[in-house]
Image (tube, grey):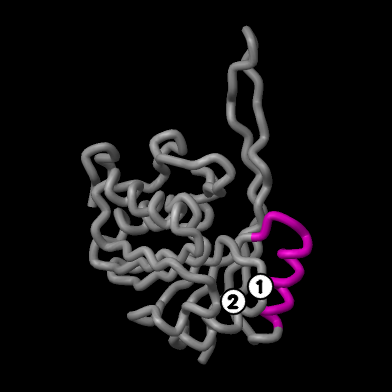
């Protein structure tokens, strides 16, 4: 359902339209589109977004799935409030922001998810193991890795959990930018996007 400042049914809100804080991670537009595609959402999906950062995924999914429910988990109060402000900015009403540390806070989240997005969290293997227990059959997890250590940890967890239909995508995006009087292409930091499904 479009908002006044994003009156479109397609995802891909420009990064500069979101309020952000210095040092707080934000999934950039092109990476966000790849991540949302991997979630394979339905109109009424329940999504847990763990390590929601600036709140770009909750906002985009909230607009895409007006009958769905998004629970954004963020441990820092200031960052949680940033997510709330971005939801208000885009008139997104179906996002609930929970302040807490994953995986410890997961038991208080209701309802249980159809999809889980993991964008942060140091104990990534513990988080993956915990969310797996809440997923129904054919539930889906999408996790991002910015370095080889995280990539290995997520891959190993998917293997231990016997995830099915595993996919790994690495973003490779360049944007046209002005530098002085010249136009040049600048690379966005590559991110690995891993996804897997629970068989039973």
Q: Give the side of residue 62 with respect to residue 20, left or right.
A: left
Q: Nearer the viewer, residue 137 or 109?
A: 109
Picture disc at residue 36: none
Instruction: Check residue 158 for magenta coloring.
Output: yes
Indicate the position of residue 47 as horizontal and vertical percent values: 40, 70
Q: Position of residue 12 (x, y in %)?
A: 42, 44
Image-quadrant location for residue 136: bottom left
Q: Which residues are the magenta region?
A: 145-159
Residue 7 is situated, as x and y percent measured from the top left of the image, at 25, 40
Chief SS of the magenta region: helix
CA neighbours of label 2 inside 10 A, class few (<14), some (14 to 19), many (20+)? many
For residue 127, the mark is 2
Q: Position of residue 34 (x, y in %)?
A: 53, 53
Q: Residue at x 28, y 42 (%)?
A: 8
Q: In the displayed image of the protein, which residue is found farthest to the bottom?
A: 200
In the picture, measured across the screen, residue 31 lies left or right of residue 97, that is right
Looking at the picture, tell me which residue is in the foreground, 53 or 152: 53
Q: Secondary structure at mark 1?
A: loop
CB atoms at circles 1 and 2 under 8 Å apart?
A: yes
Q: Residue furthest front?
A: 77
Whether residue 131 is situated above or below residue 48 in the rendered picture? below
Task: Relative to 26, say whether 140 is above or below.
Answer: below
Q: Residue at x 60, y 83 (%)?
A: 129
Is residue 31 shown left or right of residue 115? right
- The residue depicted at 28 percent of the width and 71 percent of the height is 44
Indicate the secondary structure of the residue bearing disc 2: helix
* Mark number, residue 123: 1
- The answer to whether any part of residue 40 appears in the image is no
Badge 1, how many Cα within 10 Å: few under 14, some, many 20+?
A: few
Question: In terms of depth relative to the viewer, which is nearer, 85 or 147?
Answer: 85
**Observer able to see residue 27:** yes
In the image, is residue 19 part of the stretch drawn in magenta? no
């Amino acid at each position: 359902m479009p908002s006044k400042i994003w009156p479109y049914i397609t995802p891909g809100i420009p990064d500069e339209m979101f309020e952000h804080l210095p040092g707080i991670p934000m999934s950039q537009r092109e990476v966000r589109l790849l991540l949302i595609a991997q979630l394979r959402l339905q109109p009424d999906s329940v999504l847990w977004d763990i390590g929601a950062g600036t709140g770009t995924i909750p906002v985009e999914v909230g607009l895409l799935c007006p009958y769905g429910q998004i629970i954004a988990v963020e441990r820092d109060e200031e960052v949680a409030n940033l997510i709330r402000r971005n939801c208000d900015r885009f008139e997104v009403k179906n996002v609930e922001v929970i302040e807490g540390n994953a995986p410890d806070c997961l038991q208080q989240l209701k309802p249980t998810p159809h999809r889980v997005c993991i964008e942060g969290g140091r104990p990534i293997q513990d988080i993956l193991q915990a969310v797996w227990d809440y997923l129904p059959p054919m539930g889906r997890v999408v996790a991002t890795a910015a370095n080889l250590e995280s990539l290995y940890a997520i891959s190993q967890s998917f293997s231990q959990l016997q995830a099915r239909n595993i996919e790994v995508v690495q973003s490779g995006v360049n944007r046209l930018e002005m530098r002085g009087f010249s136009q040049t292409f600048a690379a966005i930091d590559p991110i690995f996007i891993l996804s897997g499904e629970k068989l039973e």
